Image (cartoon, rainbow, N blue to C red):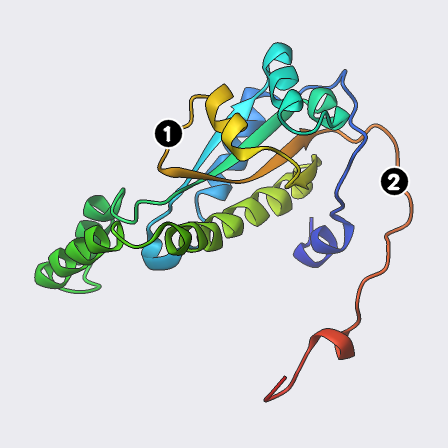
Amino acid sequence: METKKVIQERRSVHSFDASKNVTDEQLKELFELVKLSPSGYNLQPWDFVVVREQKNKERLKAVSYNQQHIADASAVVIVLGNKLASAHGEKNFDDWAKKGYFDQGTADNLKKQMKDWDNRDEETKKVWTTRSTALAAMTLMIAAKDMGLATCPMEGFEPDKVKKEFNIPENYEVVMIIALGYEAKPGLPRVWRRGYKEIVHHEKF
């Protein structure tokens, strides 16, 4: 599908066809695209927990204010952001040096800097990982639409309970949950969107 059309037609779907399943092959294709998302320093702080078993979707629903589309969607993706900047620093910066972006000394300095970043305050780390991980979440939704799948990004959940239920380590932020599957019925017309002149400010606010 043409990129412009994908963006225009992507909607947040709340009514999923519980009888239609997303396949393993579709998930692999989807996440092969998601992994190409941009991130600060290419540190790729994201991880994803894909929930497909009905009993586990019900567990997730229970800690997400009992939203029914979690149970009806074929899969639900828990989008996680690693708060440790150094998590993938070694492999990442060594690769940059190997491919000629900079020398090994610069790579080693950057690896040390990322370890220093791990000691920043909790709020700074949350904001840092959310910025990059949200980009991957948007890639997921756009790529899913292009594959004929429907999604719904959700912020209605209890993060601490989600982490406990799904054994998520403490150094991860639960950025959002995305329901994924097939739309059960056509949605209502798109709701109001602010226009160009409202959202774009030239030179100053």
Amino acid identity at mark 1: Pro
Circles 2 and 1: CB atoms closer than 8 Å: no
Q: Tell me if 98 is positioned left or right of 164 in this view.
A: left
Comparing 121 with 176, the one in front is 121
| CA gap, disc 2 and disc 1 | 37 Å
* Residue 24 pos. (x, y %): 54, 21
Outermost residue to the left: 105
Q: Is residue 35 above or below residue 184?
A: below
Label 2 packing within 10 angstroms: few (<14), some (14-19), many (20+): few
Disc 2 is placed on an element classified as loop
Instruction: Give the residue displayed 37% in from the left and 33% down from the top.
Output: 170
Q: Tell me if 84 is positioned left or right of 97 in this view.
A: right
Q: Is residue 202 above or below residue 33?
A: below
* Residue 137 pos. (x, y %): 55, 45
Instruction: Give the residue displayed 18% in from the left and 53% down from the top.
Output: 111
Q: Which mark is residue 123?
A: none
Q: What residue would you read off at disc 2? A: 187
Q: Is residue 198 above or below residue 193?
A: below
Q: Tell me if 199 is positioned left or right of 165 in this view.
A: right
Amino acid identity at mark 2: Gly
Q: What residue would you read off at disc 1? A: 169
Comparing 20 with 39, the one in front is 39
Residue 12: name its quadrant: top right
Outermost residue to the right: 188
Quadrant where the C terminus sits is bottom right
Comparing 177 with 188, the one in front is 177
Q: Tell me if 157 is positioned left or right of 167 in this view.
A: right
Disc 1 is placed on an element classified as loop
Comparing 1 with 45, the one in front is 45
Nearest to the eye among marks 2 and 1: give it: 1
* Residue 178 pos. (x, y %): 62, 36
Instruction: Give the residue displayed 50% in from the left and 31% down from the top.
Output: 160
